Amino acid sequence: MNEERYSTKRITVKEIDEILYEEHRVLDHGFIRVVDYMGSDGAIVQAARVSYGKGTKQINQDEALIKYLMRHHHTTPFEMCEIKFHVKLPIFVARQWIRHRTANVNEHSARYSILDNEFYIPNLEQVAKQSDNNKQGSGETFDLDTSKEIIDSLINDSNLVYSHYNKFIEQGLAREIARANLTLNYYTQFYWKIDLHNLLHFLKLRADKHAQYEIRAYAKVMLDIIKKWVPLAHSAFIEYCLESACISRTGLGVIRKLIKGENVTREESNIGKREWDELMFLLDRKS
């Protein structure tokens, strides 16, 4: 058998090398780990300068350039970095995740393998009612007794469908059919490779407070990994994307009037109620 040999000529990042293949636990049975990566902060500035050298050696100049690129949405230099993750996650989270079609993915197949009896059960504080003003989000939590009743039902249902699945397998039913009754909280796994630009776009949406809790849990771990991998790009992303705000032209007009001390009402601004409420929230004003 040929022995794999690894060259040290490529640029590496010590902080990422130290956590390669290390499992970062997420939710009750999930994890995310780095399988491989390419590039660094240096690769971003190198691409921006279209040079073959190591780029500017003064970190403050590299930092300023990366901030400029992020601030002005110059995306291609960030595409020079790539990373590959191994992710274990509930199927319903995987279906949200896979909507981002800018990555390469290969998922564990239940046609070939028998799934383990591992399913996701939310914590009590995550058992919440449907939001009144967001069709795809959660609202206030239930009382403790109702939450426990829901959790018990989820556990019982999950165990029941797996017992049937296991019976199907023992009876010799084709795996591609036997899997059909498994619920969306069962775990799947995939390898997911993506460039840094598209990864940051993914995290802009999935680390946002409005995203579903379960996928935010994975996004938080990924942000910590990115901070180790490309700290300058991570800092710029936090500053200009994740913790910034996009304000419309009309919204800027409202802000300018407020700065001048003028009184502005939503009706006068011609801004929709939802956008107005968001703007007032950003300005820490009551809508």
Image (cartoon, rainbow, N blue to C red):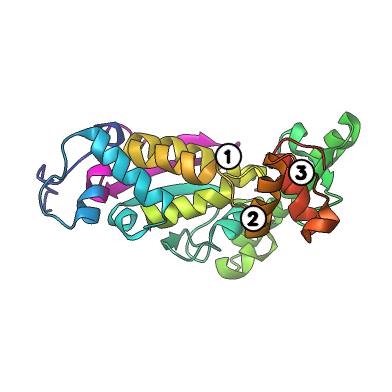
142 horizontally vs 23: left or right: right
Q: Is residue 21 magenta?
A: yes
Labels 1, 3: front one: 3
Residue 112 shown left or right of residue 76 in the figure: right
Magenta region: 18-44
The tag earlier along the polypeptide, 3 or 2, is 2
Quadrant of res 11: top left
Name the residue rendered at 43%, 57% in the picture: 198
Q: Which residue is mark 1?
A: 217
The amino acid sitting under disc 3 is Glu
Q: Position of residue 285 (x, y in %)?
A: 77, 37
On residue 92, the disc is 2
Going by the numbered disc 1, the residue's amino acid type is Ala
Left or right? Give the position of 284 relative to 229: right
Residue 171 drawn in magenta: no
- In the depicted structure, whether residue 134 falls above or below residue 60: below
Which residue is pictured at 60% across the width and 36% down the height?
Answer: 28
Q: Residue at x 13, y 55 (%)?
A: 51
Q: Residues within 10 Å of mark 2 (few under 14, many from 20)?
A: some
